[in-house]
Amino acid sequence: MEAQRNEVPRGPSRLFDVAPEEELLYSITAEGKRKFIHPVVHKGRYWKIRRSMAYALMVLFFGLPWIPVGGHPAVFLDLASRQFHILGGTFHPTDNLLLAALGVSIIITVFFVGSTFGRMWCGYACPQTVYLEFMFRPIEIWLEGTPVAQRKLNAAPWSAKKAAVKSAKWALWTVLALLMAVTFVSYFVSWSALLGDVLPNPAANKAVVGVALFLTGMILFDFGWFRDQMCTVACPYGRLQNVMADPDTILVAYDQPRGDPKTKLKDRIEGGTYGDCIDCKSCVSACPTGTDIRRGLQPECIGSAQCIDACDVVMERTGKPPGLIRYTSEREQAGGTRRIWRPRVIIYLVLLTVAWGTLAALVIGRAEALVEIIRGGREPYRILPTGEVANQQRLRITNQLPQTQSFTIQVLSPAGAKLVLSESPVVVSPAELSAINAVTTVPPSVFSDGQAEVRYLVTSDRGFKKEVKFLLLGPYTDSEGP
Ligand code: SF4
Ligand code: SF4
């Protein structure tokens, strides 16, 4: 990629003028200043697909915290009670196998998507693109006009009209940023808590309010000012893309043999040999990162396909077939055929199936409840006047179903063991945890090396059934004493 950039002819007379423009980011001037990009939006076929995806993703983001599933929002990462409610299932920090499977699945998916579809994620589904191109930028265009009008307004001296337009734009953006920030917070706090507790009494919920305001500021900074810099300077995915891509990865590219030599229509003379590119720079002015795709593959390209839509319009007007800029691959560009099924993709697909399959199996095979017995009381055991040995315990039951469950516990072995509970049956609400006290009493003869295994059977009215083992502590007999 860099090699292609460096192919720009240099010479002592051109170096000063050309080098900064050719070697720097498109959004940086030769003096090192920020060059704000105001892309022209081309509402072509890829833009329409991106818009549909963007709206669907927005509906998902704003809607999920409002949709109740199993008594909780569809996605509710309840940090306060350390429970994660996802589509009716309740997960806990102790579900570490699930978390590990999820993490591995996501990493493999990123590599699969990156190596197969290139930066399509960036152009179609990344929140940066979705909200900038389909929420914040449309408002700017609505209030300030075309990119040319925007540049004119920015360059104009301050006036009442300019102040009004800019204020209206930032006010609208602020409202949207606040809505996005509060929605994001609702994934962790829930809308019912936000509206019922935080809104009536913000002073008592400074942390939540602070996070929401901080996020609002960050969103405004990003979509109002930082914009393309997030993709070209800050985001690590673009850099990672260079590692993940191979010659068959899908990318947006200019068909150089067909397009070159680029010549403006006005410079063309009868009988001359010209490429299909009329050097109108429509593709460049459409690019949200300012990239000139005609100079080859570049890390600044986020795969928005706006240059394809822009160039297709030009090709139609000039009577040429579309696709001078199109989705292709490095191999196809070099005259070969793009291979879809290659070893890397097959390996990723196998790993993906294993990873997501494991996760699905873990979720499906998840028990209706978690039962945990821990030691209670200050002393390891107590010898009762009857000679029996008593162990105090804490019994913790987590109901993982969206319905209330009523649990009963009985002791199975050893012979002569008795169990006394502070509460029986133990009724546990959906996705809640109940802890009760328990005392298990056994004859001293069951102890060996100061320990005795006891087995319990925990059942519920919802069909849960689990045998739980626990090691009781007790005295060493004379013959076994330490
Ligand atoms: S839009 Fe097409 S014709 Fe115009 S400069 Fe770009 S590649 Fe050439
Ligand atoms: S070069 Fe084309 S595909 Fe790449 S970011 Fe610019 S407009 Fe989008």
Image (spheres, grey):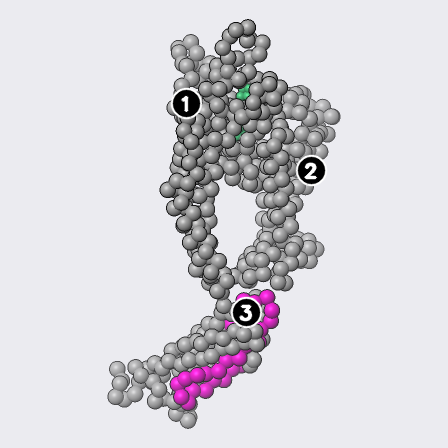
Q: Residue 126: give x, y in percent of width and height.
A: 54, 40
* Callout 1–callout 2 Cβ contact below 8 Å: no
* Callout 2–callout 3 Cβ contact below 8 Å: no
Tell me what residue is drawn at x 63 percent, y 63 percent.
71
- For disc 3, the marked residue is 399
Compute the Cα span from label 1 to label 2. 42 Å
Amino acid, disc 2: Leu
Q: Residue 332: give x, y in percent of width and height.
A: 43, 29
Q: Secondary structure at mark 3?
A: strand
The residue segment tinted magenta is: 397-422
Compute the Cα span from label 2 to label 3. 44 Å
Tell me the quadrant of the picture where the N terminus can be found. top left
- Dot 2 or dot 3: first in sequence order is 2
Q: Secondary structure at mark 1?
A: helix
Amino acid, disc 1: Gln
Q: Nearer the viewer, residue 11 or 206?
A: 11
Q: Nearer the viewer, residue 24 or 49?
A: 49
Q: Nearer the viewer, residue 472 or 378?
A: 472
Q: Which mark is residue 172?
A: 2
